[in-house]
Image (cartoon, rainbow, N blue to C red):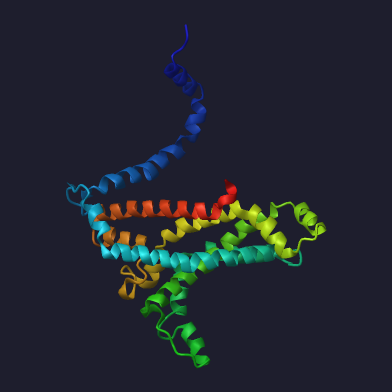
């Protein structure tokens, strides 16, 4: 007589109970700190709640308000502008650094790898304080240097483009080394025999770069673009420490996550904050998909 599948499954679980017990802490922690917040935020997105009183069902009013909220769309625009200002030069610099670290004429490579990766493990609060001193309107280091060369001083943290430049430079400084290490791992995985064969066939260095390096490095580039997109859309600590909860002058540094934080934990609109969080999730998913299609290119079909 065949054993029912459910009884067979229960028997297998009981047989391997020691293994399941060993790995259960991870799943329990993931359920408590991962699945539950996701489900609760989705539930909260349809309610009005100040964090203390009773929840009131609000239907799609939070979503309707978010779509017509000019501050939300300003935060979306700021986030995209800062992402463009920071991610494109950051990945470009990271690729250059990776090529230099991979070059045979460079000595003390381990020292330089550690040096370039060090900003990524530095406290972001300390970094924000240093950049606040660098871009300060009065007595800032940048303005001091510009004054030495008789250049007009700039109120970096009072003008929209100056605020975005300050935030973008912080992102570039922190993540260039991290992405360079990833590119370096990709470069080291490319067989040198391909370059030797191309050299025998008379290919120049530029031809080898565009015909061998870039195509074989494309999966790595795709990974860095996707992770940089997700990270760039979640920018929070840098503007919060540098500019405060309102995003600086005119809200020029208000990012999506900073806006979510202000609405949830400063104004106590937890239901609306949850709605903004899900809106951000949809924007990141859509933008990552577009980036994936662009970087993957038609040759992958």
Q: In front here: 110 or 231?
A: 231
Q: Could you tell me if residue 225 is visible in this image? A: yes
Percent x, y of residue 84: 47, 66
Percent x, y of residue 100: 68, 66
Residue at the extreme right of the image, as rendered: 200
Percent x, y of residue 24: 46, 34
Q: Name which residue lies at 31% across and 59% down.
A: 260
Q: Could you tell me if residue 51 is visible in this image? A: no
Q: In front here: 243 or 104?
A: 104
> 134 above or below 76?
below
Percent x, y of residue 290: 46, 54
Horizontal side of residue 275 vs 121, given as left or right: left
Horizontal side of residue 56 vs 250, given as left or right: left
Q: Name which residue lies at 72% across and 66% down.
A: 108
Q: In front here: 114 or 56?
A: 56
Horizontal side of residue 246 vs 106, given as left or right: left
> 86 above or below 190?
below
Horizontal side of residue 96 vs 293, given as left or right: right
Q: In front here: 51 or 214?
A: 214
| Quarter of the view holding residue 238 | bottom left
Q: Quadrant of the C terminus?
A: top right
Mark count: 0
> 80 above or below 300?
below
| Quarter of the view holding residue 287 | bottom left
Q: Name which residue lies at 27% across and 60% down.
A: 263
């Amino acid at each position: 007589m065949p054993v029912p599948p459910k009884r067979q499954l229960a028997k297998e679980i009981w047989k391997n109970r020691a293994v399941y017990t060993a790995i259960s802490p991870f799943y329990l922690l993931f359920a408590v700190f991962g699945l539950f917040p996701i489900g609760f935020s989705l539930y909260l997105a349809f309610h009005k709640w100040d964090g203390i009183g009773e929840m009131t069902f609000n239907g799609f009013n939070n979503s309707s308000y978010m779509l017509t909220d000019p501050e939300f769309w300003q935060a979306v625009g700021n986030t995209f502008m800062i992402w463009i200002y920071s991610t494109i030069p950051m990945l470009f610099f990271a690729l250059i650094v990776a090529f230099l670290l991979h070059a045979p004429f460079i000595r003390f490579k381990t020292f330089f790898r550690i040096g370039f990766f060090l900003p990524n493990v530095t406290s972001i609060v300390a970094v924000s304080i240093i950049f606040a001193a660098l871009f300060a309107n009065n007595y800032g280091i940048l303005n001091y240097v510009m004054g030495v060369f008789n250049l007009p001083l700039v109120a970096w943290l009072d003008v929209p483009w100056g605020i975005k430049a300050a935030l973008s430079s912080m992102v570039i400084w922190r993540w260039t080394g991290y992405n360079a290490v990833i590119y370096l791992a990709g470069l080291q995985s490319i067989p040198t025999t391909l370059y030797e064969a191309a050299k025998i066939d008379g290919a120049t260095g530029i031809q080898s770069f565009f015909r061998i390096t870039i195509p074989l490095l494309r999966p790595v580039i795709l990974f860095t673009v996707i992770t940089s997109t997700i990270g760039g859309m979640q920018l929070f600590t840098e503007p919060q420490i540098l500019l405060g909860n309102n995003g600086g002058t005119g809200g020029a540094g208000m990012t999506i996550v900073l806006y979510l934080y202000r609405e949830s934990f400063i104004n106590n609109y937890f239901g609306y904050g949850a709605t903004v969080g899900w809106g951000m999730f949809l924007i990141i998913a859509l933008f990552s998909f577009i980036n994936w299609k662009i970087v993957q290119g038609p040759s992958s079909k």
